Amino acid sequence: MAILAQTPPMGFNTWNTFGANINEQMMLEITDMIVEQGYRDAGYEYVVIDDCWSLRERDEDGNLVPDPEKFPHGMKYVADYVHSKGLKFGMYSCAGTRTCAGFPGSFDHEYQDARLFASWGVDFLKYDYCYFPANGDCKNRYLTMAQALRASGRDILFSACNWGWHEPWNWMRSIGAHMYRSTGDIWDNFPSTSGIMKSQMDKFNANAAGCFNDMDMLTVGMNGQGNVGDPNCNTYTEYETQFAYWCFCGAPLMMGADIRKVGEEYRTLLQHKGLIALDQDAECRPALMLKEWNGCNTFVRHLADGEFAIGVFNFHENDQYAVVMFSDLGVPVGSGVKLALTDVMTGEQLAPRRDDLMAEVKGHHFRIWRAKFVD
Ligand code: GLA
């Protein structure tokens, strides 16, 4: 069997834009777009159907049944199409007796459902936490599905979603999840996005190859439209910040906008090579928050090949001047070394320097540099 999730999983999920309005045709179109618009080449791999794909009841054998109006050829047909484009196919179920939208959940059906998903060619399972019985044992039930997937005979990435309840960063890796939702649902506005960002600053230590902290699907490019859309949606600047933070932290990148319709600037952002390189860095180390000053948080993150990234995120709506003192990064002035810095967004290379760096950070925006040592 393959080792899954060696770097943060990347893909598309239906929930943020489409909610219950999903069907075969749009899944095929999204799949085509991922290839034709360059997302596959940028690293996006999993095409995931979220809640609301099944009928309200299981069949007489206890099997889940795809809604024939939404998916007239069944799920294997969609999976085969996704696979024919060199991509992987994801589906959704729930650890409770019902999904969050009230469709049948997998409680007490874990092995049966895992086998059914495997028979359809599913490569990824998002597993939610609604309608979980009060006398149920949460960890044991996530472990049971992790084992059921492993026993299914197919490599299926386990995307466990329990909204950060019961401190999942302490046990989701051990029970066999490949990513775990660490927060409640994202909405397409800056208070929601920045709330998620702040809530996870000190919880990234468990982020490493094989299992990643999932801060929820991206809203980049939704522009107020869709299921989690908001008329007071993020601005382009704020979308950039969302994408950059997810990448800086090495979080899974699951697109939530209707990529058949997003503007060119969002496609470019979602495929930003420098940011995606941070997200997918081979060393998979977590980011470390160094300090908070005037609404700006400074982070450092070790990267492969001895480089590291410095990030300053401004949660304040006003522009700020941020000072990054190299001693905070573990590089005091007496070290005798200098840092060569490259701005990840502009590509600007700064002359090697010691001591500190002062930079303007726009309101609700960020600066990220890649750093390396020079004599
Ligand atoms: C929960 C999850 C969401 C989405 C919905 C579907 O709210 O957190 O990501 O899957 O359920 O009903």
Image (cartoon, rainbow, N blue to C red):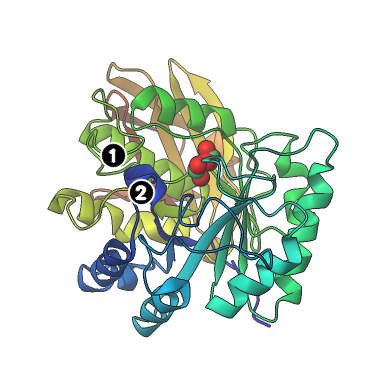
Answer with mark 2 or mark 1, whichever residue precedes in sequence: 1
Q: CA distance from mark 2 to mark 1?
A: 9 Å
Q: In the rendered image of this protein, does residue 356 appear above or below residue 343?
A: above
Decide if ligand 1 comes within 8 Å of the CB at mark 1. Answer: no
Q: Quadrant of the N terminus?
A: bottom right
Question: Can you give x and y, in whole percent of width and height, for residue 39 in the image?
Answer: 29, 66
Residue at the (29%, 38%) spot, across then down: 239
Give percent across and percent down for residue 158: 63, 61
Q: Is residue 125 visible?
A: yes
- As drawn, 34 above or below 230: below
Give the side of residue 126 with respect to residue 296, left or right: right
**Residues under numbered marks 2 and 1 in contact, where contact means CB atoms less than 8 Å apart:** yes
Q: Is residue 353 visible?
A: no
Judging depth in this view, the residue of 8 and 156 nearest the camera is 156
Secondary element type, mark 2: loop
Of helix, strand and loop, which one carries label 1?
loop
Residue 249 shown left or right of residue 22 in the figure: right
The residue under label 1 is: 226
Which residue position is annotated with label 2? 256
| Residue at the limit of the structure toward the front, as seen here | 60
Q: Is residue 27 left or right of residue 52?
A: left
Near-viewer residue (2 or 367): 2
Query: Which residue is painted at 29% across and 27% down in the image?
Result: 230
